[in-house]
Image (cartoon, rainbow, N blue to C red):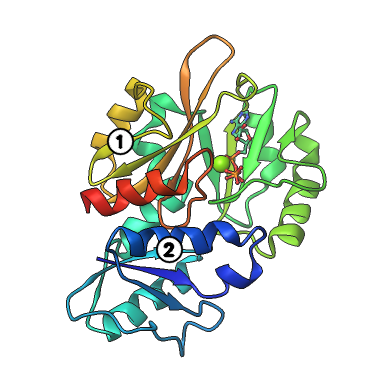
Amino acid sequence: MRVVFAADYFEKTVPDEQYRSEAAAFVRAGVPVSTVSVDDLSTAKLVPKPEPEETVVYRGWMLNEASYKQLVSVVEASNAKPLTPLDGYLLTHHIPNWYPLVTEYTPETIVLPEGTNYEAELRKLDWPKFFVKDYVKSLKTSMGSVITDAGDIGRLVEEMAKYRGEIEGGLCVRQFEEFRAGSEIRYFVVDGQPMGPDAEAIPRVVEECATRVGSRLFSIDVATRADGVERIVELGDGQVSDLVGWQVDRFVEAVSGVL
Ligand SMILES: Nc1ncnc2c1ncn2[C@@H]1O[C@H](COP(=O)(O)OP(=O)(O)OP(=O)(O)O)[C@@H](O)[C@H]1O
Ligand SMILES: [Mg+2]
């Protein structure tokens, strides 16, 4: 196995120390490391080149579908294999793919393709509050991702396109659920094995989710709802998940020990 870091992760991320120390920790664990420039994947190369047939794990920025597809081509052009093929990446990266696998554990969600009359669709739902994302991300700036009035959806979509640069896929409108402040925890599942940031017990919803999702490396964010029920907030591809709450060494040990 080899870990390939997005090259400019080191230069552009503040604090960049985290990624340098992650790469150093993989090397200490005996896992070779390369970099790839994701700014232009059409001409990119893995530096240094992997061994033939080596399995490659990417760590870096979230990539959209077209870019991840290019990354897979770059890896394959080096005679190496991606740990996660394109369909596996999109399975945990895009809500409409993972939502059907864990519907009962996560806020109810409807998917609206671009071009839909969003306001009309929201009015049909009998929901007091809506949490709006595209297939990947919420809106963290501007007016935020939560609206109570369906009439505000047009403005939210405009702001999302502006701040996110694009609407990735389409719109996902999720029922708002009240989560306990500070209760969200990120778990990683490596080859079917769920792990948390510390030795605490793994919640049952995480155990269950780990058996249902066919990706070798993904993250599960779980928060406690006001009524005490553990809820999945979102899944993510483990290659592009931040280490929220995790010590670098624990993540590196989890990934390099099991794969
Ligand atoms: N349906 C929901 N109801 C209420 N709060 C929600 C809902 N979905 C998400 N949240 C809250 O908003 C935060 C951000 O949501 P989410 O993780 O889905 O978006 P994101 O853009 O991927 O954010 P991040 O980069 O923080 O992971 C969550 O950590 C959670 O606290
Ligand atoms: Mg999140």
| 44 with respect to 168 (left or right) | left
Q: Along the line of sight, which residue is nearer the eye, 211 or 115?
A: 211
| 123 with respect to 253 (left or right) | right
Mark 2 lies on residue: 24
Q: Residue furthest left?
A: 53
Looking at the image, do the residues carrying marks 2 and 1 touch, with CB atoms under 8 Å apart?
A: no
Which residue is pictured at 39% across the width and 33% down the height?
Answer: 196
Which residue is pictured at 72% across the width and 46% down the height?
Answer: 140
Which residue is pictured at 60% across the width and 21% down the height?
Answer: 179
In this rendering, which labeled residue sits more in front, label 2 or label 1?
2
With respect to residue 235, does 83 lie above or below? below
With respect to residue 31, does 141 lie above or below? above
* Residue 250 position in % (x across, y down): 38, 43
* Residue 195 position in % (x across, y down): 34, 35
* Residue 184 position in % (x across, y down): 54, 29
Q: Residues within 10 Å of mark 1 (few under 14, many from 20)?
A: many
With respect to residue 154, does 50 lie above or below? below
Note whether residue 195 is visible: yes
Mark 1 lies on residue: 194
| 54 with respect to 219 (left or right) | left
